[in-house]
Amino acid sequence: MLSNEDILRLRTDFPILEEKIYGKPLIYFDNGATTQKPVQVLSKIEYAYKHLNANIHRGVHYLSQKATEAHEEARSTVADFLGAAQREEVIFTRGTTEAINLVAFSYGEAFCTEGDEIVVSVLEHHSNIVPWQMLCERKGLVLRVIPMNERGELDLEAYASLLNGRTRLVSVAHVSNVLGTVNPVGEMIRMAHDKGIKVLIDGAQAVPHIPVDVQQLDADFYVFSAHKIYGPTGIGILYGKQELLNAMPPCQGGGEMIDKVSFEKTTYNVLPFKFEAGTPDYIGSTALAEALRYVSAIGLDAIAGYEQALTEYATEQLMQIDRMRIIGTAREKSAVLSFLVGDIHPYDLGMLLDKMGIAVRTGHHCAQPLIDSLHIPGTVRASFSFYNTRDEVDLFIKALQRIVPMLS
């Protein structure tokens, strides 16, 4: 478990935490949307642009060679972080959304025919719904949805009943970005594999908070975004088993993803380059690798333990507020609290919290089907990081105690 001294020391790595918002110290509880960046990552970006900026893979000169080495070392760092069997199974994308779209297009082209079925859950972010709807519309597939219980936990009996001979793929979040529910993805993967069905796991909300081993999970695909785990925006990861990626066609054409081009025929490059058309974000990849080294040095088990304790403390304190309603009470939760207070609109709460220097997220959180199923207008979401403290939670509670009577 991280101590208070550890947290205070780690907070000094994040310059933005010294910012003042309307004259008050920033309390940043919007980590589910994006995390702040430590100086180690910021310095890596600056160093790369100052000393290693040259297009990779295609140059024979020194800078190009060094930039290529850094980019490919970053791929190896990601593979090690996820427990991938081979570095070629790691594809750089622009983020979780592009990674899911890549699989929806390429896996769909290779393995799906009219009448086949895709399974998602009611908990999903739009980025894990819309690409599959587009695939269904394009190829005449059927989208099936796993329901949840009143606690916000997926109904595994209903899930089992959805799996059949026409199911081609299950795509489900590891952790819900709205409810914080940690889904039993290991068990869900085993259930699907027993019927020969492939599984994609959206790990965007999982990798910053809990250790992930894709081989232990036996995930066919696993995706996440750098900016959710203290890295830069605009870059993310698709992990896929090599045999599947080899069987899938590329989804974009251009430079880098080719072997030989002629006007008569083009042949494609080997993994991982087959799926990386154009100049990649070679600066972002090195910064992502630095972010992964940063959290690995702290220890994801230590991070998980601290954040769980902080979330439990915040839950206890929130429940002292009259008419408080926590949305999502799963037995296994990550560092997310969504709530409503009486009939106060979440937007109003969020606006007044902002005036007190407290950053939370309000609305449907890019999960409209989930919010609609709960028959609510949205929620206020506080999402935590290891750099958040109990003192910040206490100030958050005091702010709510001041705001709620004003809006009631």
Image (cartoon, helix red, strand yellow):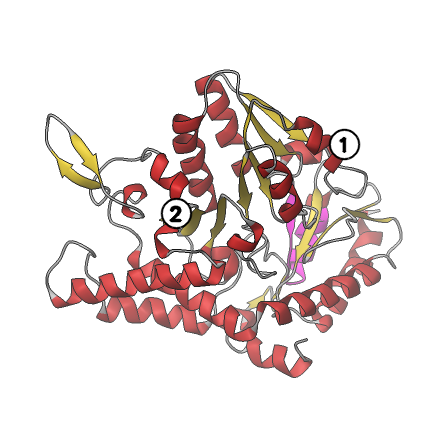
The segment highlighted magenta reads 348-363
User: How far apart, in angstroms, are the residues tagged by discs 1 and 2?
Assistant: 33 Å
Residue 128 is left or right of residue 2, and the answer is left
Q: Is residue 331 magenta?
A: no
Which residue lies under the disc numbered 1? Answer: 375
Check disc 1: other Cα within 10 Å, few if <14, some if 14-19, many if 20+: few
Please report the residue visible at 39 percent of the width from the left and 28 percent of the height from the top. 110
Quarter of the image that includes the N terminus: bottom right
Q: Secondary structure at mark 2?
A: loop
* Comparing labels 1 and 2, the label whose residue is closer to the camera: 2
In the image, residue 406 lies at what x, y percent?
81, 52
The residue type indicated by label 1 comes to: His
Please report the residue visible at 13 percent of the width from the left and 35 percent of the height from the top. 261
Residue 85 is left or right of residue 338, and the answer is left
Residue 236 is left or right of residue 391, and the answer is left
Which residue lies under the disc numbered 2? Answer: 94
In the image, residue 199 lies at what x, y percent?
54, 39
